[in-house]
């Protein structure tokens, strides 16, 4: 036997969860701790250590640390290094764990035992959770658990983490293991060819003695689906169809709820306007708060639907297939398919997308991916696209299930994706030159997404969206209302209300500032109102919508929806101020521009921190702004040359 | 100035104070635990 383990004399027992990627570690962590960390059916969802805890019936506190997945103890990527540092006690922030919980996938026991056997040699008490025993049984795989316990010399508990099965025995095993000695090492803890060969030989013998598999006449359901999903021609077509359906659904399914919220916001704003006497306070509430925050709130249904679809794609296992499909294209730009998973994560938010690059081993591959992830249209762009498409693009049917509005939305997402590939190719041929490495990607079996898990994600994202609307967007709307209202401009008493309000807005602090910066946006066909809204949206992209809402709330004598106000806006010569061409140009600007402080901060950290991190973040910000300005200008010039506006 | 203008300006000042405080808190948090995103919870 090895070094005896010892339970900590006082304080919580520390348990570290480790295992191969996509074995259900985070699902088990969530089940044990009651937390709601993000899970997905592909490798590399967890890229940093996450801590939670639970209490035993006797009051004993157990701290659980969820670690990124690893295939062996030889770390090759930043996320694997995080896991190993914790296990070896090299993580400066915390002591070495008291017990290691190795999660192994019962459907791929042979491969999973490589890491499990290495962990058994770290000199720490070990418990193995034999997870997904239900999936193994469905495939005709039977594991002789007592025999496996005998072979490994550690406690093994069968679990189905997604259904919470086996949790109580697992909790008891973890507490008991802290008092047991560490398992006896079988091999030297190195990665030499001899040791690796000996370890695989031992694993082959163990599998032969403990696992029985019923012969299967035909391939699994996953294999049959993959025959279509990974087909050379059919696969890419299916990917495009899936994305088109997602964006069409985000647009059309959300519309009835969006209209109801819009009517509700206008109605409540109108009712409050009746209660508060005429004056600045009423203007602040109606034109500032309701017009600003209300114009963003109406996009809640779209945000909820987008996250629901992204969750379905992540949990079903289709994300890994998309990465596999894109591998050939990614190689042409100098990356490999593995970089496509962080890029797809960027559809939700660039921050987790950039953090997901920790799964990429090669530093230059990783940096190139970090630099292009923000080009993927994130959920913050959705309100901008939806407002402009709803106002200026007709719902003209194109194909069964797809109209021009959905196609325009899809085009914006595809434009960002294609630009990301092009820019990555440029970086890989210039600043980040290097060889293209082959991709090793595990294709997980397809799984039915859990409705509960999707509901939790949609709920969490909706609450965060509402919290932002009720905090930062509310505060910015109030400040922008003040800037649009003061200083006062005397107007002729007999001037029509619309003219009086437009004069006041034009002479306000916001109006004067807007006109000062107007020359910078005039080449793109934008007026000062768009210019100010773009500048304000550097705080957060959605603020573009709330700023336009506040400007039109203050400057508009009526109480109309923002889209109607934009369509009705006229230049002094009577022509429409905003045309479909300007709307497309503006959307293209938002596809490319980096307007997110959180993304800049995470790029600084993940690109090396300090001066190096800041340098790459500056390069990222500058190239994206230049691309945004250039592309928006090109759209306008080409569109006008074609007689479109 | 009218009372409702004073009230509106008070709300504006409170909003400015909130935005400044938020920027300071987020900046400190970014230095301590790394940057996060309050849109997606990361």
Image (spheres, rainbow, N blue to C red):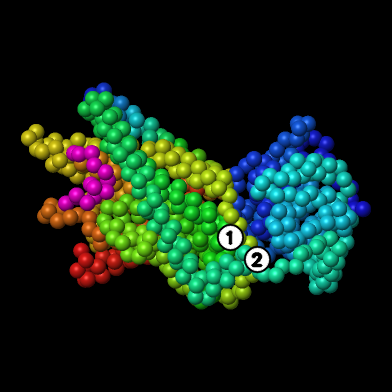
Residue A625 in view: no
Residue hosting label 1: A317
Residue furthest toward the right? A1
Q: Secondary structure at mark 2?
A: loop
Asked which secondary structure carries label 1, the reply is loop
Q: At x 58% / y 64%, what residue is drawn?
A: A320
Give the Cα separation between the discs numbered 1 and 2.
14 Å
Which one is in front, A358 or A504? A358
Residue placed most toward the observer, A468 or A23 = A23
Question: In terms of image quadrants, where is residue A176?
Answer: top right
The residue lying at 45 percent from left, 37 percent from top is: B21
Q: Which mark is residue A624?
A: none
Q: Residue at x 70, y 58 (%)?
A: A138
- x, y percentage for residue A543? 36, 46
Closer to the chain start, of discs 1 and 2, is: 2
Most extreme residue toward the top, as rendered? Answer: B3
User: Toward the viewer: A602 or A12?
Assistant: A12
Compared with residue A580, is residue A302 higher up or lower down, i.e. above or below?
A: above
Region rendered in magenta: A557-570
Graded by Cα atoms within 10 Å as few (under 14), some (14 to 19) or many (20 or more), the crowding at tag 1 reads: many
Position of the C terminus of chain A by quadrant: bottom left
Along the line of sight, which residue is nearer the eye, A275 or A1?
Answer: A275
Examine the rendering and report whether any part of residue A534 can be seen.
Answer: yes
Is residue A568 magenta-colored? yes
Same chain, marks 1 and 2? Answer: yes
Q: Which residue is mark 2?
A: A220
Chain of the residue where label 1 is placed in the rendered structure = A
Quadrant of res A72: bottom right
Farthest left residue in view = A494
């Amino acid at each position: 036997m090895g070094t005896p383990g010892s339970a900590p004399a006082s304080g919580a027992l520390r348990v570290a969860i480790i295992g191969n990627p996509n074995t259900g570690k985070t699902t088990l962590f969530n089940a044990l701790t009651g937390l709601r960390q993000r899970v997905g059916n592909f490798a590399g969802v967890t890229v940093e250590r996450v801590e939670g805890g639970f209490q035993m019936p006797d009051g004993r506190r157990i701290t659980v640390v969820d670690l990124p997945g690893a295939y062996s103890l030889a770390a090759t990527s930043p996320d694997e290094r995080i896991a190993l540092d914790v296990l070896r006690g090299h993580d400066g922030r915390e002591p070495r764990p008291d017990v290691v919980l190795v999660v192994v996938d019962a459907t791929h026991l042979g491969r999973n035992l490589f890491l499990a056997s290495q962990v058994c040699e770290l000199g720490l008490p070990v418990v193995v959770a034999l997870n997904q025993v239900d999936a193994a049984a469905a495939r005709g795989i039977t594991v002789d658990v007592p025999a496996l316990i005998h072979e490994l010399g550690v406690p093994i508990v069968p679990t189905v983490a997604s259904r919470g099965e086996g949790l109580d025995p697992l909790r008891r095993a973890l507490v008991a293991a802290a008092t047991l000695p560490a398992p006896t090492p079988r091999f030297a803890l190195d990665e030499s060819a001899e040791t690796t060969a000996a370890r695989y030989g031992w694993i082959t013998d163990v599998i032969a003695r403990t696992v029985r598999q019923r012969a299967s006449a035909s391939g699994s359901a996953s294999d049959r689906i993959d025959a279509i999903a990974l087909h050379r021609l059919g696969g890419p077509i299916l990917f495009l169809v899936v994305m088109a359906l997602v964006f069409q659904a985000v647009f059309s399914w959300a519309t009835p709820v969006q209209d109801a919220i819009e009517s509700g916001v206008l109605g409540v704003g109108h009712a409050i306007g009746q209660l508060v006497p005429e004056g600045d306070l009423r203007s602040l509430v109606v034109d500032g708060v309701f017009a600003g925050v209300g114009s963003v709130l109406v996009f809640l249904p779209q945000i909820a639907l987008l996250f629901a679809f992204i969750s379905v794609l992540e949990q079903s296992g289709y994300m890994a297939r998309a990465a596999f499909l894109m591998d050939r294209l990614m190689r042409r730009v100098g990356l490999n398919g593995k970089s496509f998973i962080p890029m797809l994560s960027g559809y939700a938010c660039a921050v987790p997308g950039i953090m997901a690059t920790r799964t990429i081993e090669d530093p230059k591959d990783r940096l190139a991916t970090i630099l292009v992830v923000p080009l993927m249209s994130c959920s913050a762009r959705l309100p901008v696209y939806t407002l402009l498409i709803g106002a200026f693009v007709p719902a003209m049917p194109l194909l069964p299930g797809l109209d021009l509005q959905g196609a325009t939305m899809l085009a914006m997402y595809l434009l960002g994706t294609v630009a990301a590939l092009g820019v990555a190719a440029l970086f890989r041929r210039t600043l980040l030159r290097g060889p293209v490495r082959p991709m090793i990607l595990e294709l997980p079996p397809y799984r039915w997404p859990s409705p509960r898990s999707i509901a939790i994600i949609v709920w969490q994202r909706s609450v965060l969206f509402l919290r932002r609307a009720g905090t930062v967007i509310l505060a910015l709307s109030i400040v922008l209302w003040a800037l649009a209202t003061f200083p006062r401009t005397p107007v002729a008493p007999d001037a029509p209300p619309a003219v009086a309000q437009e004069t006041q807005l034009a002479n306000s602090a916001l109006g004067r500032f807007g006109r000062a910066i107007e020359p910078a946006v005039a080449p793109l066909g934008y007026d000062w109102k768009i210019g100010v809204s773009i500048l304000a949206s550097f705080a957060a992209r959605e603020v573009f919508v709330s700023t336009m809402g506040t400007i039109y709330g203050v400057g508009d004598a009526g109480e109309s929806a923002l889209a109607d106000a934009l369509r009705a806006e006229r230049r002094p010569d009577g022509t429409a101020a905003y045309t479909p061409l300007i709307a497309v140009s503006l959307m293209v600007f938002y596809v490319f521009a980096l307007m997110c402080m959180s993304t800049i901060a995470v790029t600084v950290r993940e690109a090396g921190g300090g001066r190096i991190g800041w340098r790459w973040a500056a390069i990222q910000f500058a190239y994206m702004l230049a691309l945004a300005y250039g592309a928006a200008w090109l759209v306008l010039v080409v569109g006008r040359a074609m007689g479109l506006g | 100035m009218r009372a409702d203008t004073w009230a509106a300006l008070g709300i504006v000042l409170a909003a400015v104070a909130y935005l400044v405080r938020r920027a300071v808190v987020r900046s400190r948090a970014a230095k301590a635990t790394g940057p996060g995103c309050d849109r997606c919870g990361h």
